[in-house]
Amino acid sequence: MMELNVRDYGSIRVAEIDCSDCSEMQTLNSPDCRQCILESLGGEDVVDWVILKRAYRHVYTSPNLSKLAKALAILDPMIHDEAHYSPKEEKKKCEKCVKSRMKKLTSIWPEIIRNPHDLSALDELAEKEAERGGEACSECSEKNFLSLLERIKSSLNSVPSYQDLDDSNYDEVFEARVMPFFVEGVWSPPKHETSLLDSYSLPDDRGKVNVYEQKGRPLPFYELELPELNLSSEKVRLLYEAYNLEYTAAPGHARFARPSRLLSFSEDWYNTLLHMVREREDVRVSAGELRKLATWMANWLTYRALEPLSRDENITDIYITAPPEKKPITITHEKWGTCETGINLTTPTLIGLGEILSSRQ
């Protein structure tokens, strides 16, 4: 069962949803996941981001997802209220009709929550019910039940981005960013049309840098292609299992840390944990690959997003402007000057990074 927590990240509100115990696909492109997330969010005030947490973090950076959930939640009590199906003075006379219509509408409501982009079931129901009864019944239907169906449609259509939805693009419309669980911040591609200005590799196979010219923007866009952002799902799951491994004593081969060697201790620790998980899960990953995974994990836990940026000797300055959730990191490049990135940190991450750096002074 998933767990939802709403937190303030500086200037924005974020719903964090722990999907660790869920067996469904962790994406809003899945109808089952959609229903679970929309029903859970409906009871909360509108949030700016929604984060689904498991081996991967799915960060939905559009507030329109929360607005859609809220619209559905507001409609839910209406369709379960007989007052919206007939005039109050005709309640007794129309009781059988009201109950029949309520049963039909409430029976299709869960499917609408699973697939809110598809309201064809409402259209079919409206067509069938419009043909019922005589003139008096037809007039009542028009003013009440058919009006209720139209209210449902207009309410959903008023949600920004709703009309762009189809059965396979929820992640795209609600601006999902998908990263392994240990990667801090939100990493986004350029939002504008680009052309490549420069490209080069970082030392020690740490990744690749692309610098783009942005159409209509004065600053170039600096992009990091990191190997850990393209790990196989098997390796990400292995890291996730190691991160969550329950143990009663320190792994035997992990040497205890002193402040001067915190990074190397973390590497030893996760390397040992990864070997333990590999043996337990019977996963075919070489010892060399495990050491590389442990190194990436330790780097992220120690220096967060600053670690990969620090590998580029062409960067002379890194700027993090408040609020970090809304203003991506900018850098100064020796060749290309000030560049935008698509990296947004969060206030909790920034505070944690400050604590780590201050502890090493």
Image (spheres, helix red, strand yellow):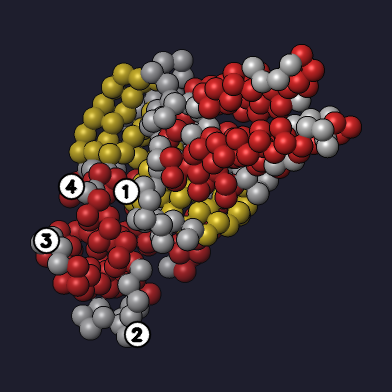
Q: Nearer the viewer, residue 210 or 30?
A: 30
294, above or below 344, in the image: below
Q: Secondary structure at mark 3?
A: loop
Left or right: 176 as drawn, with respect to 297: right
Residue 67, horizontal then vertical, whole percent: 62, 36
Circle 3 residues within 10 Å: few <14, some 14–19, many ≥20: few
Amino acid type shown at disc 2: Thr
Circle 2 residues within 10 Å: few <14, some 14–19, many ≥20: few
Mark nearer the N terminus (1 vs 2): 2
In this rendering, the label closer to the viewer, 1 or 2: 2
Q: Nearer the viewer, residue 157 or 103?
A: 103
- Residue carrying label 2: 248
- Residue carrying label 3: 284
Q: Nearer the viewer, residue 330 or 32?
A: 32
The answer to whether residue 183 of the structure is visible from this angle is no
Q: Nearer the viewer, residue 159 or 76?
A: 76
Amino acid type shown at disc 4: Asp
Please report the residue visible at 31 percent of the width from the left and 18 percent of the height from the top: 195
Left or right: 3 as drawn, with respect to 47: left
- Residue carrying label 1: 308
Q: Tags 1 and 4 in contact by the CB under 8 Å rule?
A: no
Left or right: 99 as drawn, with respect to 241: right
98, above or below 32, in the image: above
**Image mark for residue 205:** 4
Circle 4 residues within 10 Å: few <14, some 14–19, many ≥20: few
Residue 295, horizontal then vertical, whole percent: 24, 61
Q: Tags 3 and 1 in contact by the CB under 8 Å rule?
A: no
Marks 3 and 4 sit apart, C-alpha to C-alpha, by 22 Å
Q: Secondary structure at mark 2?
A: loop
The answer to whether residue 171 of the structure is visible from this angle is yes
Q: Tags 3 and 4 in contact by the CB under 8 Å rule?
A: no
Left or right: 147 as drawn, with respect to 348: right
